[in-house]
Structure formats: structure tokens, C-alpha cells
Image (cartoon, rainbow, N blue to C red):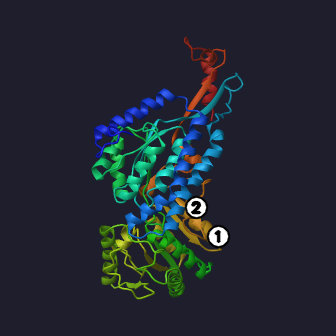
Amino acid sequence: MDEATNPTSWTAESMKALLDRQRTAFLAELPVTLATRIDRMDRAIDLLSSNEGKIADALSEDYGCRPRDLSRFTEAAACIGPLKYARKRVRQWMRPERRKLDFPFGPLGCRAHVEYVPKGVMGIISPWNFPVFLVFLPLSGALAAGNRAMIKPSEHTPVTAKLLEELIGQTFDETEVAVCTGGPEVGQDFSALPFDHLLFTGGTSVGRRVMRAAADNLVPVTLELGGKSPVIVGRSTDIGRAALRVTMGKLLNAGQVCIAPDYAFVPAESVNDFVMAVEEQIRSMYPSLRDNAEYTSVVNQSHYARLREVVEEARGSGAEVREINPANEELADDPLRKLAPTLVIEPDDKLQLMREEIFGPILPIKSYRSIEEVIAYINERPRPLCLYYFGDDAEERIRVLSRTTSGGVTVNDVLIHALIEQLPFGGIGSSGMGVYRGVDGFKSFSHPRAVFTSPRLNLWKLLGLQPPYGKALQRTLARELKA
């Protein structure tokens, strides 16, 4: 791009002009061929494969400390998988779906099908916790569906945002895919643009503002908002296995994951065993924290201060707080913002860490006596993005899943359902709306257009709908009104 199309400071006017250029190019290109879609996905794959090291370096600089191999996996390899999956199947997804017609239309020779046509220009607002993955995961569906895209990355990972802008600018023409960097004001103006579809990943409060802005232009939205995803440790599970997998999911990216386990319900008689097992797993995985390149920093000082505050509030309330610091390192003045994994046992529900999504390496643990208590507790609160159940009791598992509502579920593990291309990913209620990933992303970012082909026969006359009305309409009414 030249300087005129890549301003140092994006404005509502310059972004609207870019949107207009993308839409003009989109309309001129119709229909978007299979070859064009595959070419764009190929270029996205090559971008990620050729620059995975640069992406890992940028994230390390933004965070202060983020494991390079973790970034290489979550921000490059995990993005290439969805693109390859879509590339392999897009020919099939593009085929019209024939619909069988009931009497009288089918017998009279009518035909009908649904074709999935591209919507046009899609807006993607991505967060800071996985700032590349949560661009390219929805982008895989957008490109497969034949759309153009404009991307607003988070300002909280500015080095990565700048790198995305450079790499996408080198790989795609600005009328195909473009990046608009900037702060909250740019994000606010971006969300108010008249896109053909808008996807936002982030917090619930900002999601509400994005939806209000999109509503002025009647822009359809997909919102991925997170929330407090519970873990239920059933009495039939192996405590050590559950502790290992919960610890893995909770400490991935230092808990800065929208689908991370937010709190755990454990049988009252097993709380101590579970706490000891989690502590053992933490010490095994992270024998030190401060200089450990595999233990992720909290992304910035304000987020770090907020997490410290919720821990101190819990401590002041009388809850048992266990900070797991295996090497007994001084972390309070750590410039890399390393926060020790922290367990809060039996927290009061009024505490901030029980009212808001934690988004950090803090795990509240609550005891229960009956599974009915747990179901009632979850159902009294906003619907979570994820629910995690551990147990080998099939009847209890069915009861939990059938009597609760969440965006997605993993049984006997955490997070994994959100990595499966064959499953839709999305929230419900305050944890989000709409789904994407795999074929579900292709369909979410396409318009399912109904196409009906009428026969030579005059259907209006045969159905009695051509004036003057008479016996034919009476026969139609008698048939259609019959219970």
C-alpha cells in the first residue's frame, strides 16, 4: 500500500473510504470463483508459515515474556490448520443444497435449492490474548466464503498489530484484506462502519457497545465474549487426572484465555485432595516463575494491577488464598509482571473474582455436596462460554449437560472442543452470539440465498390464487387448514 491508503492514524473517513473500495472490488469480481478463494487461503497459509518466528518475537515483545513455541503453535500452526481444512472442503461447501419440495410444489415440477453466496466485506475486531489466531481463525471462514475483510487488532499488543499490518499489506491487496491499527477511538469508529458482517472477540461490556454501533447500520454480528466458564469435578472422576488438565487449561497463557476454566466445583470431601493435586502439578510444570521463559507474563500493568487487586480482596475477605511460588521468588516488583498461580478456596460469591471473568492465573475452588447445587448455581448466573465436566458417571454427565446451557462443552478435559474444526465455536447470552469455525464459519459468513424455479404451469391458477377466486381456492384452503 502507498501512504495514501495506509495512513499513520486511521479515521472514520479513511476507514469508510477503504470499505467502499473493498465493496466496489467485491461487486466487480462476482461471482467469487473457487480458484480465487483457494488462492487467498494459500497466501494466508504462506504468510503464517514464512513468518512464524517474527510473530513469536512480536508477541514476546508485547507481553514481556511469552513462550516462543507456544506462540508458534497458537498463533501460526493453529491458524494454518483451519485454513487448510477450509481449502480442502470449500468446493463441497460452495455446492448448492437441493431441497425436496412437498405437495403440491414438488409433484408439479417445481425445483428449489439454497446457495451460499458471499456477504461482501467483513469486519474483524480481534483481542490481545491471541492476536494472530483470533484474526486468522475467522478470516479462514471469511475467505472460504468469498468475502473481503478489514481487521482492527488490539492496541494492547501494538508490536504484533504493526507486524500484522505489514505482513497482510505485503500479502494482500488492500481491497482484499487490510488492517486498521489504532486505539479505542479507531475501534469505536471501526465498529460503526456499515460492514456486511462484523465479528468481535473481547469483553462483554465492549461487546455491548460494538453491537449498539453495528445496529445503526443493521450489520449482522458475531460476538465472542467469554465469561465465567465452570469446571465440575464429579465424584466418579480421577482427582489427579482432573487436576492435571484443569491446571494445564488454567495456566495456558497465564490464564489469559477466553475459554480458560474460571472456577471449579469439587466434592466437599475431595477439596483438599484436589488442591494438593493442583499444587503438585503447578510445581512440576513451573519449578520457577520469574526467569522461566515458559511462564507467560500478564500482558500489561493495568491488567496485572487488577489481578493483584482481586487476590487481595479475596485474602481480606477471609478466603483461603494459596499462591504457588515453587522457588519462593520475589515477584512483587517483577518488571515482567509474573503473577504466581493462585488458588482461592471457598471464596464468597460477592467477591470480584466470582462476579467477573478472571482472565489470569487465579483459580477459585468451591465445594459442593450434591450435583443439584452445582446445576442451580450455574443456572442462576449468566450463561458461560464453556462448561467442563469431569466424571465417568454417564447418568450424572447427562443430567449436567441437559440441565445447563453453555456455548460449548468438553467432557473430561478443558478447552479442546474449541480446537475441533468439525465443531461450531461460539457463545450464548452474555458469553456471545453466533458461531464459526469450519463449515459453520463458512455458513455464518455467507448468505444462504433461496432459489426457487417455477414450472411452465400457472401455479397461481392451480392454487386458486388468480382472481376471480373460486372452487380451486376453496380446495386449497380446505387442504391447508386441515389439522
Quadrant the C terminus occupies? top right
Quadrant the N terminus occupies? top left
Q: Amino acid at mark 2?
A: His
Task: Report the disc number at residue 395.
Answer: 1
Q: Is residue 409 above or below residue 134?
A: below
Q: Is residue 114 above or below residue 341?
A: above
In this view of the protein, which residue sits in the foreground, 148 or 200? 148
Residue lying farthest to the top in this orientation: 468
Residue found at x 34% / y 49%: 181
- The residue to which callout 2 is attached is 417
In this view of the protein, which residue sits in the foreground, 219 or 188? 188
Question: In terms of image quadrants, where is residue 192?
Answer: top left
Camera sees residue 384: no
In percent of width and height, residue 125 lies at: 40, 50
Q: Tell me the element at label 2.
A: helix
Q: Tell me the element at label 1.
A: helix
In percent of width and height, residue 187 lies at: 32, 49
Q: Amino acid at mark 1?
A: Glu
Q: CA distance from mark 2 to mark 1?
A: 21 Å
Residue found at x 38% / y 63%: 62
Camera sees residue 261: yes
In percent of width and height, residue 96 lies at: 64, 34
